[in-house]
Amino acid sequence: MQLKLKILSVMLMIFHATSQSATVDCANMVINSVTVEGPRDDQHVFQNKLLILFQSECASKRYVHASLDHPAFNGFLSIALAAKASNRKVHIGVNTNEQTGASNQLAHISIVD
């Protein structure tokens, strides 16, 4: 009986760890660059995306991305450009279940006081 409980416990921990995705918040982030990419002949992973590079990592990545057709794209771009132009830090949230090898998907962004 104890062996069955141990096996069940291990299986639940493994299942929980692999099915878990989260939005991770990171405060006081410094933007190094803001890039918008259109269609590319080389089919690069960041084509048709907003790409922001930060000075430090958030959820293990320095880049965040958002598709050009994302409903919040204009807001994401406006806040990122305003923060970069005014040398202000931002608070971001990233979706870790929508990532590329180099970036997480941007969930929200705000300028920090």
Image (cartoon, rainbow, N blue to C red):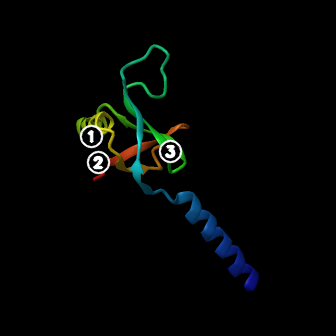
Q: Which callout, 2 or 1, points at the residue further toward the start of the chain?
A: 1
Question: For this view, does 17 lie left or right of residue 68?
Answer: right
Which image quadrant is residue 15 in?
A: bottom right
Residue 57 position, x and y percent, is 51, 46
Name the one closer to the observer, 85 or 70: 85
Residue 77 position, x and y percent, is 28, 35
Q: CA distance from mark 1 to mark 3?
A: 18 Å
Residue 72 position, x and y percent, is 26, 41
Which image quadrant is residue 36 in?
A: top left
Disc 2 vs disc 1: Cβ atoms closer than 8 Å?
yes
Residue 79, which numbered label?
A: 1
Under tag 2, what secondary structure? strand
Disc 1 vs disc 3: Cβ atoms closer than 8 Å?
no
Q: CA distance from mark 2 to mark 1?
A: 7 Å
Q: CA distance from mark 3 to mark 2?
A: 16 Å
Under tag 1, what secondary structure? helix
* Residue 28 sits above or below residue 69 on the image: below
Q: Amino acid at mark 3?
A: Ser
Reading the image, the residue beneath label 3 is: 56
Q: Residue furthest front?
A: 87
Characterize the local packing of mark 1: few (<14), some (14-19) or many (20 or more) Cα atoms within 10 angstroms: some
Q: Which callout, 1 or 3, points at the residue further toward the start of the chain?
A: 3
Q: Residue furthest top?
A: 41
Question: Image point 41% across, 43% down: which residue?
Answer: 30
Question: Image point 33% across, 39% down: which residue?
Answer: 87
Reading the image, the residue beneath label 2 is: 111
Which image quadrant is residue 106 in?
A: top left
Under tag 3, what secondary structure? strand
Q: Amino acid at mark 2?
A: Ile
Name the image quarter holding the N terminus: bottom right
Characterize the local packing of mark 3: few (<14), some (14-19) or many (20 or more) Cα atoms within 10 angstroms: some
Residue 91, which numbered label?
A: none
